[in-house]
Image: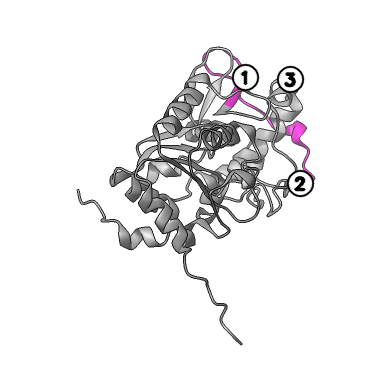
Amino acid sequence: MTTEQVPPPDPRLRHFITEHPALFVLTGAGVSTDSGIPDYRDRDGQWKRTPPVTWQAFMGEEATRQRYWARSMVGWRRFGHALPNRTHHALVQLERRGQITLLVTQNVDRLHQRAGSRRVVDLHGRLDQVRCMACEQREPREAFQQILCQRNPDWAALDAADAPDGDADLEHQDFARFEVPACLHCGGIMKPDVVFFGENVPRERVDAATLAWQQSDAVLVLGSSLMVYSGFRFINAAAKAGKPVAAVNLGQTRADALLTLKVDAPCDRALAFLASDLPVATT
């Protein structure tokens, strides 16, 4: 029996990062897979499972909200306790060296912040908050989880395989039995404080990301196929403006034709050199 040989990190990526001291970084689901959070797409950029719920369906159909929150209640038990991995920590070190102008993440897990990154824009929001769509009241997701479990004790004992973004693959359940709590302040619809498909990214996040890539001398994409336009727009604009763009991703990306450098490898392996190259800050 032979041991699989793990290829060394691509030296071109080390050179790219060294040569560009002001990086605009965009991260996607591939950054968080080593934290136990599944991604959405395969190597060809196609969906691995049913696409996520849309804003229109969630807001317009009670049955969709029941299905969403039942699956989320089960999935949150593990998602809410996920820990940052080596890729998150490598980016913290890169930021502490002053080399990141802004880190824009398409993930909603807040693991960059938990690792210690400070210059972060959560492009698609954050799953650790829920928001009332009527009065805009925001509550911690953990507190909402307790209410979900209190209202639906039979569901609290269920378990299922993890799905992306705190979801769980519950099948063959009668979701009509699930009780979705309304806003405690006004009775409005409670929604995770994330951007669903069909919903617009808030303008201030787009503006912050746009200014950051314009002020950067290069772009680094990590763990994203860029199939979603909300992230791809920045890479497309930066490349057209003449900014060098490097991407680390398992499989193709929507921006392959625009890339200066493409590394087909897991993010933690590709960035492994940062652990030894960069000093660890002391407190």
Residue receiving disc 1: 189
- Residue 283: x and y, percent? 19, 48
**Residue sitting at the far bottom:** 1
**Residue sitting at the far left:** 283
Distance, label 2 to label 3, CA atoms, is 22 Å
Between 164 and 230, the residue placed more toward the observer is 230
- Identify the residue shown where x is 59% and y is 85%: 2
What is the quadrant of residue 67 in the picture?
Answer: top right
Of the two numbered discs 1 and 3 in the rendering, the one whose residue sits closer to the viewer: 3
Which quarter shows the N terminus?
bottom right
Q: What stretch is highlighted in magenta?
A: 172-191
Residue receiving disc 3: 60
- Residue 213: x and y, percent? 45, 33
The amino acid type, in three-letter code, at marker 2 is Glu
Decide: few, some or many residues near mark 3? Use Cα within 10 Å; few <14, some 14-19, many ≥20: few
Q: Which of the two labelled residues, at mark 2 and mark 3, occupies the earlier sequence position?
A: 3
Q: Is residue 145 covered in magenta?
A: no
Left or right relative to 202: residue 16:
left
Residue receiving disc 2: 171
- Name the mark on residue 102: none
